[in-house]
Image (cartoon, rainbow, N blue to C red):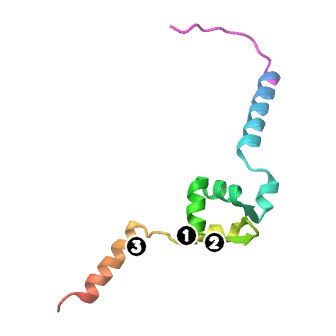
């Protein structure tokens, strides 16, 4: 059985500890404002931004599957183009698919 220890901590101390914990969590998990304004990413940043491994990133660039620019031996990625590329293969929700199927059947059914 776990031991329970009761201690008295002033309310202001508890508030201060909570504020510090929240501040630390925000600073670790929310990107800095500098990264939000950056529009051109290097290879490592682009892989991290779209959530892929570097080896997969190399494969995509060598196949020409992902939009990038080359300057010398370095690859650079436009953040907006990456966003468009990520969203380019969107799928339809089940309701839309059902409606399209019903329309297709209605148009192509034998009379």
The percent coordinates of residue 14 (x first, y second) are 77, 23
Quadrant for residue 91, please give it: bottom left
Mark 2 or 3: the one toward you = 2
84 relative position to 17: left or right: left
Q: Residues within 10 Å of mark 3 (few under 14, many from 20)?
A: few
Give the main secondary structure, helix, strand or loop, of the magenta stretch.
Answer: loop
Residue 63, which numbered label?
1
Q: Which residue was labeled with disc 2?
A: 67
The percent coordinates of residue 19 (x first, y second) are 78, 33
Residue drawn at 72 percent across, 10 percent down: 7
Quadrant for residue 10, please give it: top right
37 relative position to 29: left or right: right
- Give how far apart the Cα atoms at labels 2 and 3 are: 29 Å
Range of residues picked out in magenta: 1-12
Is disc 2 placed on a helix, strand or loop?
loop
Residue sitting farthest toward the front? 73
Residue drawn at 69 percent across, 59 percent down: 43
Residue 96, which numbered label?
3
């Amino acid at each position: 059985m776990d031991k329970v220890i009761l201690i008295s901590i002033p309310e202001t101390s508890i508030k201060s500890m909570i504020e510090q914990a929240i501040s630390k969590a925000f600073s670790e998990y929310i990107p800095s404002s500098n990264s939000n304004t950056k529009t051109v990413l290097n290879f490592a940043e682009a892989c991290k931004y779209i959530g892929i491994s570097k080896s997969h990133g190399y494969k995509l660039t060598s196949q020409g599957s992902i939009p990038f620019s080359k300057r010398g031996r370095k690859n650079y990625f436009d953040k907006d183009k990456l966003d468009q590329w990520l969203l380019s293969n969107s799928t339809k929700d089940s309701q839309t698919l059902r409606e399209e199927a019903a329309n297709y059947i209605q148009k192509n059914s034998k009379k």
